[in-house]
Amino acid sequence: MDFEQILGLGLLQGLTEFLPISSSAHLILLPLLLGWEDQGLAFDVAVHVGTLIAVVSYFRKDISKLIVGWFLSVFKQQQSQDSRLAWMVIIGTIPVGLVGLFAGDLIEIYLRSPLVIAISTIVFGLLLWWADANGQRNKSEEGLTLKAALTIGLYQVLALIPGTSRSGITMTAGLVLGLTREAAARFSFLLSVPLIFLAGGLKTIELAGSAIAIDWFAIIAGVVISALSAFACISLFLKMLEKIGMLPFVIYRLLLGCFLLYYSLG
């Protein structure tokens, strides 16, 4: 891999992992447009590690509180707002973890095509717009109920369809359930931690069992670039979200989806 490809894919993963615009659509589109060869499994692992570092670093205080609260709730039966939110994150992760484990290969084989990505980019973009326009937006993530967390978790299963956007569909669910934009985004980002960890772990196991040569410069550069771009993305997104809303991202998704439709059907 040359540095142009490392930079492009690292930035792309870091930016699109947390914006509601679908990382899979971009990671398929950019190499096709620029004629790049497949970056390989090792680089995929690297950029996932980078985004995990970014979200854990940004929410380090929150995550520390959730971990401590969870352990206290399990071993000392001390319930708190932090332990409750930690359980909500766990519950919201279970559905996609189960479906991904048992049906992930089928989804990868049958749904990973430019046409499917184009349609899901448009459809779930419109759903995001509807949720943002009609949601009550008056609740915080601390007020989530067990049913609400499970509902967001079930929505997150749809993110296994390429083009959906994991962050986009979980924010959509949060808005439907009455969360503020910032609360929907924060819970979406907290939900990403176990999911990225599990996905990165599975890719690492797969990588360990292969005999491919590893380009360590590309790996290290990919981690650094994706981590820095993801951290900046999370920070700016949360600061700007209440002011700009979801409409700019919806418009972008519609344009991207139409382009992918043209590409796949042309």
Image: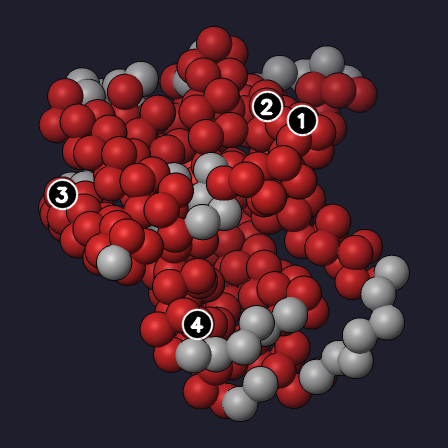
Query: Secondary structure under badge 2?
Result: helix
Q: Earlier in the sequence, mark 4 or mark 2?
A: 4
Marks 3/4: CA distance?
A: 27 Å
Q: Which residue is mark 3?
A: 247
Q: Which residue is mark 4?
A: 31
Q: Is residue 101 left or right of residue 91?
A: right
Q: Which residue is mark 1?
A: 98
Amino acid carrying mark 1 in the image: Leu
Task: Indicate which label's residue lies in the foreground, 4 or 2.
Answer: 4
Marks 1/4: CA distance?
A: 30 Å
Image coords of residue 109 (percent x, y): 60, 44
In the displayed structure, 35 sits above or below 78; it is: below
Amino acid carrying mark 3 in the image: Leu
Residue at 58% x, 44% y: name it.
108
Tell me the tag on residue 95.
2
Image coords of residue 84 (percent x, y): 55, 20
Amino acid carrying mark 2 in the image: Pro
Residue at 50% x, 47% y: name it.
112
Q: Earlier in the sequence, mark 1 or mark 3?
A: 1
Contact between labelled residues 2 and 1, with CB atoms less than 8 Å apart: yes
